[in-house]
Amino acid sequence: MGTPPEKHEFGLKRGKVFPVERAGSLVNPLRRLVQSPSRTVAAMGLVENAIVLEVGSGPGFFSPFIAKAAPLGHVMLVDVQFEMLAAARQRLARVANVWYAQADACALPVGMGQFDAVFLATMLGEVPDKDLCIEEVRRILGPGGLVTIVETRRDSDFISLTSLCDLLDRHGFSLVDRRGVAWQYVARFQARGPAVAP
């Protein structure tokens, strides 16, 4: 697992963790007009028995759709803020195939190669050590595992597709496909070869 994370700074500016006090804006129904959770999750191409990790789930905007896409599998939501997970748990109270874990994206509390897919939506820019985060994602994915990353310019921590491809290439991922436009996209990457223990 990764090294212990540094203390997080919360706020709305670049590089800060989105604060739980503003969680309501993340699940506002109007968000669906510009960022459809059903279309976004469909782009992941999940099989019905997939084991999926959502990193930085927040209050669970995408989570119900991920759980529905893998009804015979399991979905684990990870967020650094306990209150975000509590909001997600309330939102998904009737969904049986979801687990919850409070953890840092750079020190994921799971063993090597345990997941088929990982989902990160508009949160990677908040992580101080993006390389360590992607290294952790690579560690927990099984052979041929897929990571789906969602970015939008509406987020102050937006990462361009070029920068994202460079980052993931350094950690053994290849771009499979991308949907959307340059300022708002869903990019899917596949792990090359088996993960290597740190």
Image: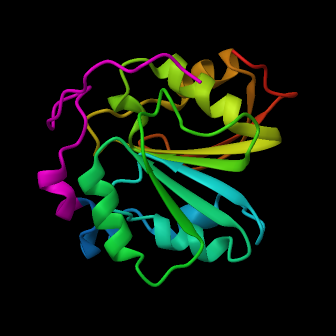
Query: Looking at the picture, how far across and down is residue 168, in whole percent?
Result: 63, 25
Camera-side residue of 54 and 5: 5
Residue at the (75%, 22%) spot, across then down: 172
Classified by dominant secondary structure, the portion drawn in magenta counts as: loop
Quarter of the figure that contains the N terminus: top right
Q: Is residue 22 magenta?
A: yes
Q: Is residue 39 left or right of residue 23?
A: right
Region rendered in magenta: 1-25
Query: Looking at the picture, how far across and down is residue 58, in whole percent?
Result: 34, 54
Q: Is residue 41 magenta?
A: no
Q: Is residue 46 above or below residue 10?
A: below
Residue at the (31%, 32%) spot, across then down: 157
Quarter of the figure that contains the C terminus: top right
Classify residue 69 by image quadrant: bottom right
Q: Is residue 4 above or below residue 61?
A: above
Q: How is the image coloured?
A: rainbow
Residue at the (55%, 56%) spot, across then down: 76
Classify residue 73 by image quadrant: bottom right
Classify residue 93 by image quadrant: bottom left
Query: Looking at the picture, how far across and down is residue 89, in whole percent?
Result: 37, 69
